[in-house]
Image: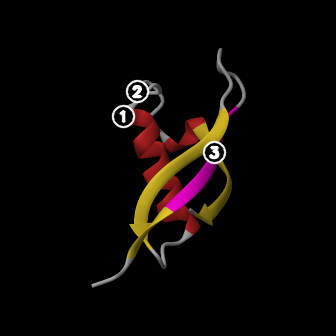
Amino acid sequence: MKERCEWIVRVQSTPGFYAQYEGNVKVWADEDSDEETLFRAAVKELGRGAFFDRKHLSFWKLVSVKKG
């Protein structure tokens, strides 16, 4: 079984929206997850909260990832 750990994924909303956002999203994922997997997990997490209307990947861009 793979070890899971907390990741901090920094994302930014793409231009053209009424409210711009740049911030960190904490996600739990396998310790060997690639950036694409972590980015998708972060967007999914944002879609569950305040950004329920921005669930598509095209609304966001990845800034950075690091282990939390």
Q: Which mark is residue 62?
A: none
Quarter of the image with the N terminus is bottom left
Q: Which mark is residue 11?
A: 3
Q: Earlier in the sequence, mark 3 or mark 1?
A: 3
Image coordinates of residue 28 in percent, x first then y, are: 41, 60
- Can you identify the residue that label 1 sits on? 48
User: Number of marks in the image?
Assistant: 3
Q: Residue at x 50, y 51 (%)?
A: 26
Is residue 20 placed above or below 60 in the rendered structure? Answer: above
Local crowd size for mark 1, using a 10 Å CA cut-off: few (<14), some (14–19), many (≥20): few
Q: Over which residues does the magenta segment extend?
A: 7-14
Image coordinates of residue 22 in percent, x first then y, are: 68, 36
- Can you identify the residue that label 2 sits on? 52
Q: Identify which amino acid the numbered label 2 is placed on.
A: Phe
Q: Identify which amino acid the numbered label 3 is placed on.
A: Val
Residue 13 appears anywhere in the view: no
Residue 33 appears anywhere in the view: yes
Quote the CA–CA distance across marks 2 and 3: 15 Å
Secondary structure under tag 1 reads helix
Q: Residue at x 70, y 22 (%)?
A: 16
Residue 13 in magenta stretch: yes
Q: Could you tell whether 65 is left or right of 39 in the image? A: right
Q: Residue at x 41, y 35 (%)?
A: 47
Classify residue 20 by image quadrant.
top right
Quarter of the image with the C terminus is bottom right
Image coordinates of residue 60 in percent, x first then y, are: 60, 40
Of the pair 27 and 40, the residue shown nearer to us? 27
Main SS, magenta region, reads strand
Q: Residue at x 52, y 44 (%)?
A: 57
